Image (cartoon, rainbow, N blue to C red):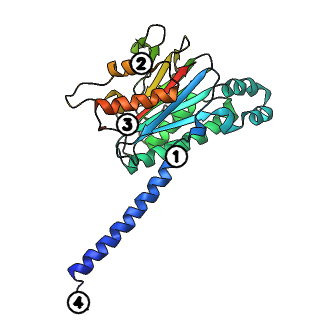
Amino acid sequence: MGEASDHERLQAAQRHIEVLRGELDRLGELLRDFDPPPGEIPEVPWIDVYGEALPRNGQAGGDHLIYVDFKKRYRMERLIAEAPEGLREKLRATSGRAGIAVIDVEGHDYGSAFIAAVFHQAFLLGVHYELRTAGEVTTALFENINTRFFNSSGIHKTLTLVYGEITESGTFRFLSAAHPLPVVFSNAFDRLVAISGDRLANFPQIGTMPSPGHSEKAVPLLGVKEKYTVNVISLMGRGDILVLYSDGLSDHRDDQGRPYFPERLEQVLRANKQQPAREIFRRLIEDMRAFRADFDDDVAAVIIKKT
């Protein structure tokens, strides 16, 4: 038989492209299943929460949110009833908090979204284990995930993280791994208030340095990282707003290179501080697009408002 004609080769290539397109569509649907639906947004008395992660390409990217409504997701009443006496008070305290994670995997593609999905599953499984053994989420969970990523030689993309828990009193306890630190808008002072970076610990990106005593691989030249510690921010009054975000927001610039953050963000919060969290988020994204229609990066933001 003779060689395939140019027409036949073209047809074969087109069929192959269609197969790949279908696979990408199915992968995109699978990855979008990890996006938190509205019903997963945590509910805490006197606290209003809303946020989204928006991929630059409109399909999939490295920015990702995880919400933890302990009461709904982990059936806390049952856990408390089954727990040893020493864990019950911690579980009761945990059930009154809401957990929020913002992660940013390097890149804006399906591979970045896949790594975010891997983190998502590892994190939620780890939370379940932590509740049963410690009654709360501890830094040990992040030590284990950090070293697991370090030991996974196939993962070459960097991953930054901020995870925190908000209480009805407005106290936000959080851990950050090379992620932009949260900002607070004061309703009383009508502006963003400075939080001293010297007082807030920020650790290396997930997986770049192993946690002490955990690595299966040779310790790198950079050594091991220090143990994670937890930061605390307090929303003091009604109407105060805490913003968690990825660098897609903080690095956003207009066509002349002028930065959006923090001045324009402050203006949006000031103009919309009476609105619920969902509406503040919507108007923030609208304003970012008005500042510059195209995003250079994925964007994630979570609005946490004390009501």
Q: Secondary structure at mark 3?
A: loop
Q: Position of residue 52 (x, y in %)?
A: 47, 36
On screen, residue 276 versus residue 152, left or right, reads right
Q: Is residue 60 above or below residue 201?
A: below
> Which numbered marker is on residue 8?
none
Q: CA distance from mark 4 to mark 2?
A: 72 Å
The quadrant holding residue 103 is top left
Label drawn at residue 271? 2
Q: Quadrant of the N terminus?
A: bottom left
Residue at 41% over, 47% down = 60
Contact (CB < 8 A) between labels 4 and 3?
A: no
Discs 1, 2 touching: Cβ within 8 Å:
no
Gap in Å between the C-alphas at discs 2 and 3?
49 Å
What residue would you read off at disc 3?
A: 220
> Mark 1 or mark 4, which is nearer the start of the sequence?
4
Decide which of tag 3 and tag 1 comes sooner along the chain: 1
Give the Cα distance between marks 1 and 2.
32 Å
One can see residue 10 in this view: yes
**Residue visible at 46% across and 59% down?**
26
- Residue furthest left as drawn: 256
**Helix, strand, or loop for circle 1?**
loop
Give the residue at mark 1.
34
- Report the side of 186 relative to 286 (left or right): right
> Label 4: which residue?
2
Quadrant housing residue 253? top left
Q: Residue furthest top?
A: 189
- Determine the residue located farthest toward the bottom in the rendered image: 1
Mark pair 3, 1: CA separation: 33 Å
Q: Earlier in the sequence, mark 4 or mark 2?
A: 4
What is the spatial separation of the Cα atoms under label 4 and label 1, in whole angstroms?
Answer: 49 Å
Question: Quarter holding the C terminus?
Answer: top right
